Image (cartoon, helix red, strand yellow):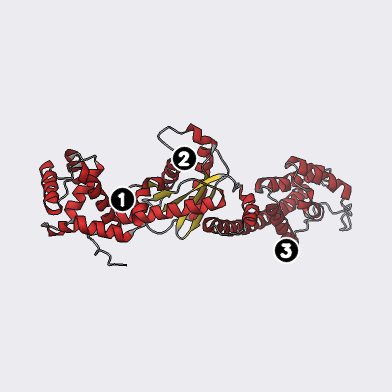
């Protein structure tokens, strides 16, 4: 470093070598300041500072690379970045306070030059430390995300070894012996920033359901939420809101705040116990999403429990085709086709067979609704107002929705 205190003859006084015991004391004090961060994470940092203060020596590239490796080690040990940086800054402060010779020097220029050299080392070392820490954290996040995706795939498939899955689920806080349910969230277009969506969902579910036994991941362009159905918060829900509806509402409400992906559709499977119950709940949620698309519902949050009737109908598609063809195919003879009459039946049943409410939903007059109902009775022989005929008509309308008839032709014989 620049010498402003040369003796006569051009020679400068020899500086004493740093005392290792003194540096050990500085390291231990810095560790205490940082909440017990291991002193091993300082490496040769204190020696670099002492050399900078005493001789004006700058840190070499290989020495800084060693500091970067220490940053990676800190990240892998789960130590927060703030505490590691605090360790390094505290070490620099303590070293400067206790530095022999320099602190006792009365030459301001020499002290200033020593301080500049130390600050340069601190600046480069902390920056390299933080960079190494960030690289390690990114690697850890990528590895954790890969493990998360593999785990969620195996859980939803339901055919993996139970013992192995229990071990793999433990780091994520999952207790596979509990009762779980699965919610699936589908964006209107492609999945937006998955990391932001996962972080938002985990935060709100942890906060509202009061449970850490939650896993959020992506699969096949959907967001998957695995949550316990026996959460302690379940007892705090209103009587009309079961755990499935609460989970679906929470997921939809949080995702709707994201800048992309709206409008979202969320489907929640029923709660089932054990490993295979997770796969079953997932299949129900996925089937509910598929069903919602087929029946063209505008409901944002779907519960698999509410769609059981559709599952029953779909299990015997030939019978449904036969029912729709026998009951509703005569509507094709109406002027304008079967579509308007089917829409009228759907609104009529959805409003509790109240013509005035049906008219509001369809944005037509009450007279138009009553005319269409009479026309349906004439063409099919089934009276929508007759309780004995109503069930047959409603089942046929549901079947037509699932078959997407009359927009698509009726399926042929199997």
Q: CA distance from mark 2 to mark 3?
A: 57 Å
Label drawn at residue 61: 3
Label drawn at residue 243: 2
Where in the figure is residue 171, as x and y percent of width and height?
Answer: 64, 50
Residue 106 appears in the rendering? no
Give the mark, 3 or 1, whose residue is nearer the N terminus: 3
Q: CA distance from mark 3 to mark 1?
A: 63 Å
Where in the figure is residue 64, as x and y percent of width and height?
Answer: 72, 60
Q: Secondary structure at mark 1?
A: loop
Q: Nearer the viewer, residue 133 or 381?
A: 381
Residue 387 appears in the rendering? yes
Placement of 66 over or under 203, stated as above or below: below
The quadrant where residue 336 appears = bottom left
* Horizontal relation, residue 387 to residue 91: left or right: left
Task: Name the residue tied to disc 1.
Answer: 297
* Horizontal relation, residue 363 to residue 259: left or right: left
**Which marked residue is nearer to the observer: mark 2 or mark 3?**
2
**Which marked residue is nearer to the observer: mark 3 or mark 1?**
1
Q: Nearer the viewer, residue 46 or 187?
A: 187
Give the mark, 2 or 3, whose residue is nearer the N terminus: 3
């Amino acid at each position: 470093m620049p010498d402003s205190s040369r003796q006569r003859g051009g020679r400068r006084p020899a500086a004493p070598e740093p005392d290792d015991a003194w540096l050990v004391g500085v390291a231990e004090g810095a560790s205490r300041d940082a909440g017990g961060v291991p002193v091993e994470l300082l490496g040769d940092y204190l020696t670099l500072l002492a050399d900078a203060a005493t001789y004006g020596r700058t840190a070499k590239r290989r020495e800084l690379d060693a500091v970067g490796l220490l940053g990676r080690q800190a990240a892998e040990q789960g130590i927060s970045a703030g505490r590691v940086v605090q360790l390094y800054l505290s070490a620099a402060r303590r070293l400067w306070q206790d530095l022999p010779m320099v602190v006792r020097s009365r030459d301001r220029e020499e002290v200033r030059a020593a301080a500049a050299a130390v600050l340069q080392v601190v600046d480069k070392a902390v920056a390299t430390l933080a960079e190494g820490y960030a690289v390690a954290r990114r690697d850890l996040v990528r590895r954790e995300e890969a493990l998360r995706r593999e785990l969620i795939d195996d859980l939803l498939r339901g055919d993996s070894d139970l013992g192995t899955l229990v071990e793999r689920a433990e780091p994520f806080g999952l207790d596979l012996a509990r009762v779980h349910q699965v919610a699936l969230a589908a964006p209107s277009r492609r999945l937006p920033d998955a990391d932001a969506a996962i972080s938002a969902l985990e935060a709100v579910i942890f906060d509202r359901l009061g449970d850490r036994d939650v896993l959020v991941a992506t699969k096949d362009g959907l967001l998957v939420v695995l949550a316990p159905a026996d959460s302690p918060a379940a007892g705090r829900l209103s009587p009309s809101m079961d755990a499935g509806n609460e989970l679906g509402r929470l997921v939809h409400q949080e995702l709707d705040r994201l800048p992309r992906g709206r409008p979202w559709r969320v489907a929640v499977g029923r709660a089932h116990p054990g490993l295979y119950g997770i796969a079953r709940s997932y299949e129900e949620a996925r089937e509910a999403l598929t069903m919602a698309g087929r029946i063209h519902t505008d409901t944002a949050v779907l519960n698999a429990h509410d769609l059981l009737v559709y599952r029953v109908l779909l299990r015997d598609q030939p019978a449904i085709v036969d029912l729709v063809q026998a009951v509703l195919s005569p509507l094709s003879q109406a002027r304008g086709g079967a579509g308007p009459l089917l829409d009228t039946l759907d609104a009529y049943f959805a409003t509790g067979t109240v013509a005035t409410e049906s008219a509001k939903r369809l944005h037509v007059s009450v007279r138009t609704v009553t005319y269409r109902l009479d026309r349906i009775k004439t063409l099919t022989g089934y009276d929508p107002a007759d309780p004995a005929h109503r069930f047959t008509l409603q089942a046929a309308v549901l079947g037509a929705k699932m078959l997407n008839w009359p927009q698509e032709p009726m399926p042929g014989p199997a």
